[in-house]
Image (cartoon, grey):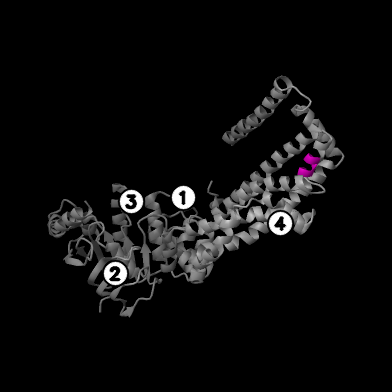
Amino acid sequence: MALVQLAQVSKVYRSLQGSDYVAVRDFSLDIEAGEFFCLLGTSGCGKTTVLNMVAGFEKVSAGDIRIGGKPIAGPAADRGVVFQGDDSLYGWLSALGNVEFGMRMRGVARDEREKKARHYIELVGLKGQDHKHPSELSGGMKQRIQIARVLANEPQMLLMDEPFAALDAHTRADMQRELKRICAATGKTVLFITHDIDEAIILADRIGVMHAGPASKLKGIVPVTLNEQERERTHDGFVEVYRQVHEMIRDEVAIALRRTH
Amino acid sequence: MRASLRGVGIYLLGFGSLFLIWHVLATWVLSSVLFPTPWKVILKAIELAEDGTLWEHSSASLARIAAGFAGGSVIGIPVGLAIGSFPIVRRLLEPYTEFLRFIPATALITVAVIWFGIGEGSKIFLIIYTTIFIVIINTAAGVSAVAPNKIRAARSLGAGPAQVFFFVALPATVPYILTGMRLAMANSFVTIVAAELVAANNGLGRMIWDSRMYMLVDQIFVALLVLGLLGFIADRLFRWGIYAFAGRFSPVT
């Protein structure tokens, strides 16, 4: 049985004028335990809506989402979320305080949670920075803290909503490598949202391409079986997967552009 | 260290120039018995300090401000938190906050004196009144301004609703609360003087009023100088306190 099961999920938003906006319709997807799944789509296609529903931030309008066979009831510690911006970090806490936040909420003893938090801060490559506050850290470092904060809470899976979109190209490439390393080390299941085809190919075991919104769903899934060396942008294998994904998303980009203009 | 010393130097220079301009104005431009020079005012201040008058009036005003300010904040903060957290409470209390905050405390002086007499009661009431709405509105605005992702992150890290409130919403609101308190402090100085001008047995406002009757212009200026100085010190202490004890919650200015 797949770890995450989305069956015929729909999400309808009601506007203040009373008209309905269907963001996602009949969206179905299974994600296996230990898998790195990238959800790729144009802007406004509803990919963040899907993540928010899996996270439990938003209720499904129809359909069913199960984690480990159990229906979800709101946000919970089994699904750690990494947000795109840094506004989810707690500015009044140090990096350490941010990373041990989840354990503190659960009542883990101070020594134990500090030890574990330091371990994860080291894992994300920020050893020795644990006393600093978010305002003293760069954008890339703040995203590392977000990742450490989620990992330290030991969730079953990570939900990442374009976590590197706001970073510069070099930092982003760096973070992608780091994330791969961390996922290999921890074996976490990941649902990763992105609009960047390169990023999806670098990271994913499978890439799900979404239709342009509204009333979006999956258009198709492209498995990525490349090894580490083949995930270089210039490698033939990489280019081949790129071509497949691009083929699928090209028309959707055109539709999305028409709808917004 | 050298940079901060230079900062202090420039600061003192600014203050020095204030007194210099005052001196020039009082000596050459508006030379009159009705406009004393800084030196005369300082001498008068020393005289009043030595006979205890200055202390009596300043401490009376300060005690009223402290009591009312503390009272207004203690009531205002939880009310503001409730308004910011629960839409029902907002709708229920908005008529009070939105209506009453436009009635200035100075307009209520007469009523306060009739209700509470010319003693401490009416003054503390007025300072509470002048403090409470600014604190409430800033606190409520602070709660509404908490980034939704902060709360979402906490929920998916396993925090319950009460934990979200105490460990996320409340600390995220502290800068707004402190800013509201700082603004309220400035208002307290306005209100206390006005109240003491109208009805009081002591206090800096009373001191100004009494001096007027005997044309003691020097003494009026002493009261003004002390008010400026006390306000300045109070604000600095408040800011210093914020940075010393809650540096991470630096106020939004």
Between the residue at mark 2 and the residue at mark 4, the CA separation in whole angstroms equals 53 Å
Q: Chain of mark 4?
A: B
Between the residue at mark 3 and the residue at mark 4, the CA separation in whole angstroms equals 51 Å
Q: Nearer the viewer, mark 2 or mark 1?
A: 2
- Tell me the residue that label 2 is attached to: A11
Are dots 2 and 1 in contact, CB under 8 Å?
no
Give the quarter of the figure containing the N terminus of chain A: bottom left
SS under mark 3: loop
Residue B78 in the image: x percent, y percent?
A: 59, 63
Q: Chain of mark 2?
A: A
Q: Nearer the viewer, mark 4 or mark 1?
A: 4
Q: Do callouts 1 and 3 point to residues on the same chain? A: yes
- Tell me the residue that label 3 is attached to: A166
Magenta span main SS: helix
Say which label, 2 or 1, has the lower sequence index.
2
Q: Is residue A218 left or right of residue B51?
A: left
Residue at 38%, 58% in the rendered image: A124
SS under mark 4: helix
Q: Which sits in the foreground, A259 or A233? A: A259
Q: Do callouts 3 and 4 point to residues on the same chain? A: no
Q: Amino acid at mark 1?
A: Ser
Q: Which mark is residue B125?
A: 4
Residue B64 in the image: x percent, y percent?
A: 74, 52
Q: Amino acid at mark 4?
A: Phe
- Count residues near mark 4 (Cα–Cα under 10 Å), then give few for <14, some for 14-19, many for 20+: many
Between the residue at mark 4 and the residue at mark 1, the CA separation in whole angstroms equals 41 Å
Q: Do callouts 2 and 1 point to residues on the same chain? A: yes
Say which label, 3 or 2, has the lower sequence index.
2
